[in-house]
Amino acid sequence: MHAPRTRVQRRPVHGVLLLDKPLGLSSNQALQKAKWLLRAEKAGHTGTLDPLASGVLPLCFGAATKFSQLHLDADKTYETTVRLGVKTRTGDAEGDVVETRPVTCTVGQVVEVLDRFMGPISQVPPMHSALKKDGKPLYEYARDGETVEREPRHVVIHDLELLDMQLQGDTPQLRLRVCCSKGTYIRTLGEDIAEALGCGGHLSMLRRIATGPFDSTQCITLDALEALSERERFERLLPVQALLAGHERVTLDSEHAGRFLSGVRRRGDWEDHARVAVFGPMPGKPPDPHIPEPVLLGSAHTKAGELIPGRLLSPSEIQQILDNSPELST
């Protein structure tokens, strides 16, 4: 007879955890593990990393999930190794080898080819990806041995740095650092570069080292998180407004804050801004000297002197943030 499972008592948790995702776990598996460790009621991530990739994965809890889309759109930076001369079915080290070719390219050719992949480029999404066609992920077609037509996607490679290069020996390879726009398939980029060099290739390593303003030096591993006390785990959370870095800041008074949280536009002498983070006092509450002010109310944009609400925190979410960790409001 199996022992009864212990039910985890969930609680409202609000903030951002910067996780260093390990190899072998999907983004969702890593999210669920962190959610369990924090006993959080609600969680989401800001874009997937392949199980065979490691690195920066911002996890959003509670009110922070309202702003996760902002980091789906953020630029990303990766370090990757392209194994030259060996093509695989999946474009990575897990796939079966489908072709081998000698590596005869020169250093000059490598530099010239890398220059070609700088700036705006088009990519055909790989068949082994989660992108959907007719409601079905491409990898499911690939599993069935089917290849379907995919529309090219336009992305931007902001920077492509050659970190190391080995063109001779048993394992010729390029080690690259790539800064790119959202939606870039690094696996496809590696394959395309290797194909342009005339030898084909696949990714043997992929690590995301930055997304938006967050980088790997700020991250914690799941093992390290598990080793912490419950309070220490909670202290690893960044405040919700960490997702609004770079937004114009607007601070409202008590009257305007209450109306804004009700979704009502406010008028003022604001310049036009596409992204605004709005702060103010806790509506409906007398000033509390123990609570730093102002608190985050939500996002907005300003146009023609109007503050137009976007994603808003609820009064209960604001109160929970203040109750659980007052310093997160500053």
Image (spheres, rainbow, N blue to C red):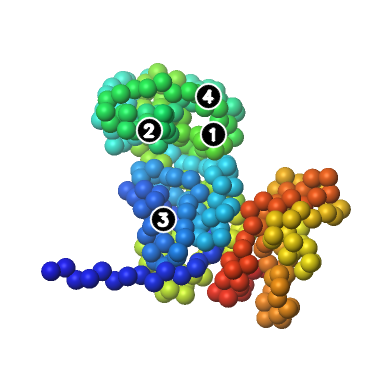
| Callout 1 touching callout 3 (CB < 8 Å) | no
Near-viewer residue (247 or 140)? 140
- Left/right placement of residue 211 relative to residue 24 reads right
Label 2 to label 1: alpha-carbon separation: 33 Å
What residue type is disc 1 on?
Answer: Leu
Q: Secondary structure at mark 3?
A: helix
Tell me the residue at 26%/69% (across/down): 5
What residue type is disc 2 on?
Answer: Lys
Q: Which of the numbered marks, if any, corresponds to residue 122?
A: 4
Between disc 1 and disc 4, whose residue precedes?
A: 4
Near-viewer residue (3 or 125)? 3
Of tags 1 and 4, the one toward the viewer is 4
Quadrant of residue 220 in the image? Answer: bottom left
Near-viewer residue (53 or 167)? 53
Q: Which of the numbered marks, if any, corresponds to residue 136?
A: 2
Q: Secondary structure at mark 2?
A: strand
What residue type is disc 4 on?
Answer: Ser
Of tags 4 and 2, the one toward the viewer is 2
| Residue identified by numbered label 3 | 31
| Residue identified by numbered label 1 | 160
Tell me the residue at 61%/63% (across/down): 314
